[in-house]
Each structure stands twice: as structure tokens, then as C-alpha cells.
Image (cartoon, rainbow, N blue to C red):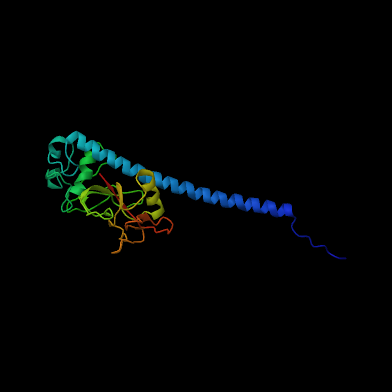
Amino acid sequence: MHSTQRGFTLIEIAIVLVIVGLLLGGVLKGQELITSARVRNVISMQDGVKAAFFGFQDRFRAFPGDYSQAQQNIANMSAICNNGNGNGDGLINPGGDEPILAWEQLSRAGFLTGTYACAAGGNNTPNSTPTSPYNVFLQMIFDNNYAAEPGLAQVARHNLKIGGQIPVEIIAEVDRKTDDGRPATGSMRFSPYAPGALPAPVANGVGTCGDLTAGVNQWFAANGTPNCGAAILF
């Protein structure tokens, strides 16, 4: 007896290809949904902090952390950092406890969800400082630790550092949705803020997160760098 070997028909091959296509499409769609959710989480976080910052400023006519009458006018302030008060000089100073105290003043005044108590010595702890969706401590401060606009002198401003450990494709999409999509201009700028050993740009303005030079000024959204960060300027 002779056995007859039979190959796949065109219909069977087409069915297999359709199934493979559907599986690949499902995986890609799932990855897209995950990315979109992460982008929304970062945007929601930074929008919440910005609203708290401006709400506090409107109510007390002072910046959180710098407010010198917090102990008198905000209930349940601790006395750990300068009795709960800033020095009232109009700046969230980087050299002391004010960047940490800012979170306590904001939370005790009801502008942030959760309760934070200042940790002396400028130390971030889970009880003193909120974290980003990527589990890095946030920082609210007056400094110039962010990308300068090409061709212009660097200036210090109040800003929110959203920390390192954010994939470059996420931070680039957040920038596109909330600002101008560029790392060296607008109100959202690349920042080499640590913790997280964030790679800073090298001398010519090119880093693993983006090219900050004039005429380029773009995030490297396609290279998959997992450790980038930004400052949101107030």
C-alpha cells in the first residue's frame, strides 16, 4: 500500500496566518494600553501636585515649605523641621528642610491626599515625601537642575521633579500631551535629578534620554532607555 502525504491547503494556511495576526495584534494592543495607562498616571500625578501648589499659594500667599506661619495657621503641623515653618523668604530653598517640609504643609492643609510629616535633615522617607508612579521620591524645589533652553542662560525656578526611573517613551509622550514634546523648552524639561542614578546629558547636550542641542531638542523615544526624568516648571 502506498501512503498519501498531504500538505496544507491555502485555506488552512490562511486561517493560521489570521490567527497569528490576531495574536500579534492583541499583544501590541495590550502593550499600547499599558503605555497609555502609565502616561495617564504620570500626568494625573503631576497635575495633582500642580493644583495643590497653586491652591496653597492662593490660600496662604506663600509657597509650600517656605510658609513661615504654618504652625499657627495649619492644624496638626509637626515640630520636626523648624517647628513646621519655613523661613518666609519666598523660595523653597534647596539647602535645608523646606523641600521636604513642603509636602507636610500641603498635606496638613488638605491639598494632598495622604499625610506627610517632615523628616529632618532633608531626608526623603515614605512618610515624608510622596512618590511617582515609578516609586521615586518627588521633589518640589527652587533650583536650576533641569535643561536650559538652547542659546539662553540657565535660570532657577520653582519646579516639580518627577524623578528618575521613567522610560523615555513614557516621558516623551507625557511631554507631547502636556507641553511642547521637547526636552529643553516649554514648562516640562529634562532633569538629571537623582535618586535613581539618572544619566545626565554629556557636555555637548546629548544624553541617553534626549538631545538637548539647538536645532535638535528631542527625546530619544525609540531607544528604550528606562531611566529618565523631568522637571515641571511652575
Q: Residue furthest right?
A: 1
Q: Is residue 118 visible?
A: no
Q: Is residue 215 left or right of residue 88?
A: right
Q: Is residue 164 left or right of residue 37?
A: left
Task: Identify the residue at horizontal 35%, vertical 42% (top origin).
Answer: 44
Percent from the top left, x then y, of residue 184? 31, 53
Q: Is residue 83 visible?
A: yes
Residue 7 placement: quadrant: bottom right
Task: Identify the residue at horizontal 44%, vertical 57% (top origin).
Answer: 222
In the picture shown, does residue 120 fall above or below 6? above
185 or 48: nearer the viewer: 185
In the picture shown, does residue 71 fall above or below 165? above
Percent from the top left, x then y, of residue 31? 49, 50
Q: Quadrant of the C terminus?
A: top left
58 or 151: nearer the viewer: 151
Task: Identify the residue at horizontal 15%, vertical 39% (top origin).
Answer: 70
Task: Identify the residue at horizontal 25%, vertical 42% (top origin).
Answer: 115
Q: Quadrant of the N terminus?
A: bottom right
Percent from the top left, x then y, of residue 8? 74, 57
Residue 208 placement: quadrant: bottom left
In the picture shown, does residue 39 fall above or below 110? below
Percent from the top left, x then y, of residue 120? 17, 51
Q: Is residue 127 left or right of residue 221?
A: left
